[in-house]
Image (cartoon, rainbow, N blue to C red):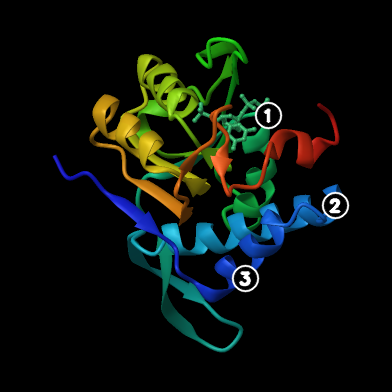
């Protein structure tokens, strides 16, 4: 099984991530940047999508054009923070269905606790992108992937803004078939299992709550 991690080196993604990391970036700009970065990542992550030829009429003549022809797509944000990535992706792939997985990391045990799941009925036929800005210990992402597999998901990618090796190892161990796409590989976790340097608590920064 190939264990894949892809880091997006696109200059716009790297530039915008730098602003997201700054503690002086307020909620409005933080939300806008997370959305913009997710949109740029959606462009990169869809480069492989298959096309087929279809015949159409332009106002001038008949011609053959390209249409997406592969599996339908699905986006599965891990709530809360994953929600901040959805609109950017949907702006490029408006027909994608959005499923939701609600998980929070218990502050004492650091274990993920599932509190919500609502997924497309045809989840088994879709190419799914599980999204969360942060891959830290990997507990939440792994649990979210297990939760959607249990409900029939087969074709899954994981997309985040920043990741650390510990989280990558966790996904590789539990779900070796799932490729991971990230904007950066940070050096590690602090004593609270926050990514360092990271960008703090993305959920809190997106929504202004603690
Ligand atoms: C954050 C983040 C991930 C998780 C990452 O969510 O959005 O889901 O932590 O940590 P892990 O890799 O160690 O599991 P959090 O639990 O803070 O919930 P929230 O999105 O509701 O703020
Ligand atoms: N949860 C957060 O809020 N921040 C991190 O860096 C990791 C997990």
Mark 2 nearby-residue class (10 Å; few <14, some 14–19, many ≥20): few
Residue 15 has which mark?
A: 3
Q: Nearer the viewer, residue 72 or 118?
A: 118
Quick one: label 2 or label 1, which is nearer the N terminus? Answer: 2
In terms of image quadrants, where is residue 165? top left
- What is the CA distance from the residue labelled 3 to the residue labelled 2? 17 Å
Q: Is residue 115 above or below residue 195?
A: above
Name the spot of residue 204 as percent of width and height, x first.
77, 34
In contact (CB < 8 Å): disc 3 and disc 2: no
Of circles 2 and 1, the one toward us is: 2
Q: Quadrant of ligand 2?
A: top right
- What is the CA distance from the residue labelled 2 to the residue labelled 1? 18 Å
Name the spot of residue 25 as percent of width and height, x first.
81, 56
Quick one: label 1 or label 3, which is nearer the N terminus? Answer: 3
Label 1 beta carbon less than 8 Å to ligand 1: yes
Residue lying at 45% horizontally and 69% vertically, measured from the top left: 9
Residue 73 falls left or right of residue 95: left
Mark 1 nearby-residue class (10 Å; few <14, some 14–19, many ≥20): some
Quick one: label 3 or label 2, which is nearer the N terminus? Answer: 3
Residue hosting label 1: 80
In contact (CB < 8 Å): disc 2 and disc 1: no
Residue lying at 36% horizontally and 59% vertically, measured from the top left: 49
Mark 3 nearby-residue class (10 Å; few <14, some 14–19, many ≥20): few
Which corner quadrant holds the C terminus? top right
Residue 59 has which mark?
A: none
Residue hosting label 2: 26
Label 1 element class: loop
Q: Is residue 194 above or below residue 54?
A: above
- What is the CA distance from the residue labelled 1 to the residue labelled 3? 24 Å
């Amino acid at each position: 099984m190939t264990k894949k991690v892809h880091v997006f080196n696109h200059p716009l993604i790297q530039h915008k991530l730098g602003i997201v990391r700054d503690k002086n970036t307020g909620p409005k700009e933080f939300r806008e940047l997370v959305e913009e970065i997710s949109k740029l990542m959606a462009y990169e992550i869809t480069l492989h999508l298959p096309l087929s030829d279809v015949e159409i009429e332009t106002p001038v003549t008949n011609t053959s054009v390209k249409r997406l022809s592969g599996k339908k797509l699905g986006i599965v944000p891990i709530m809360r923070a994953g929600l901040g990535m959805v609109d950017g992706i949907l702006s490029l792939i408006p027909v994608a269905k959005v499923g939701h997985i609600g998980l929070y990391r218990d502050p004492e045990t650091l274990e993920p606790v599932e509190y919500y799941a609502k997924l497309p009925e045809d989840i088994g036929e879709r190419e799914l992108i599980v999204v969360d800005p942060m891959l830290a210990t990997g507990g939440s992402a792994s649990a979210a992937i297990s939760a959607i597999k249990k409900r029939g998901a087969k074709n899954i990618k994981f997309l985040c803004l920043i990741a650390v090796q510990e989280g990558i190892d966790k996904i590789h161990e539990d779900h070796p078939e799932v490729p991971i796409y990230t904007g950066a590989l940070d050096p590690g976790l602090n004593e609270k299992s926050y990514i360092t340097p990271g960008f703090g608590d993305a959920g809190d920064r997106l929504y202004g709550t603690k």
